[in-house]
Image (cartoon, rainbow, N blue to C red):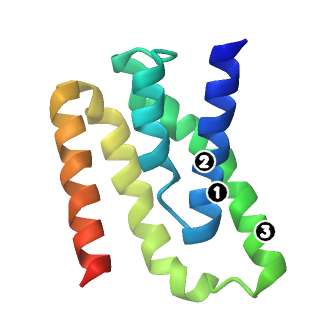
Amino acid sequence: MKNYLILALAGAAAGAVNGLMGTGGGMVLLPILSLSGAVGEEELFSSSVAIMFPICIVSLIASAFAAPLPFRNALPYLLGCIPGGLLAGKFSHRIPIQWLHRILGVMILWGGIRWLL
């Protein structure tokens, strides 16, 4: 029961971050999933994607009620996301977990520094 509460709180934190900023819920979720031991290292990133997908849909719906969604501005990114997501999904299991952690850490640092400057 305690583990379910921790996981539910992790989901709530990821949803809140994603809803407030439009992204970033996975950055909250990955460390919590890793520390909780609920998900094995091999399943960590795919589990995060599976959890974040419905959270993103909820955030999208909530945003649509608040303001019109700029699909025209998003279209070029969406077209690029399809091949990028397919390639990453196909090859990510070949990258050692430690490297995925490092890549994520660098991306979080880079994003944080950019937002601070």
Relative depth, front residue between 31 and 97? 31
Q: How far apart are the alpha carbons under marks 3 and 1?
A: 12 Å
Q: Does the residue at mark 1 contact the one at mark 2 (Cβ under 8 Å)? A: yes
Q: Which residue is mark 2?
A: 13
Q: Residue at x 28, y 67 (%)?
A: 111
Label 1 neighbourhood size at 10 Å, few (<14), some (14-19), many (20+)? Answer: some
Secondary structure beneath label 3: helix
Q: Which residue is mark 1?
A: 16
Label 3 neighbourhood size at 10 Å, few (<14), some (14-19), many (20+)? Answer: few
Among the 4 quarters of the image, the one containing residue 2: top right
Q: Residue 62, which numbered label?
A: 3
Instruction: Give the residue type that dot 2 points to.
Output: Ala
Secondary structure beneath label 1: helix
> Residue 33's spot in the image, x, y percent?
47, 28
Q: Residue at x 17, y 41 (%)?
A: 102
Q: Quadrant of the N terminus?
A: top right
Q: Does the residue at mark 2 contact the one at mark 3 (Cβ under 8 Å)? A: no
Relative depth, front residue between 69 and 1? 1
Q: Is residue 68 left or right of residue 88?
A: right
Q: Quadrant of the C terminus?
A: bottom left
N-term mark: 2 or 3: 2
Q: Is residue 107 above or below residue 64?
A: above
Q: Residue furthest right?
A: 65
Q: Is residue 16 above or below residue 90?
A: below
Q: Residue at x 76, y 87 (%)?
A: 67
Q: Is residue 78 above or below residue 3?
A: below
> Residue 87's spot in the image, x, y percent?
31, 45
> Residue 44's spot in the image, x, y percent?
41, 26
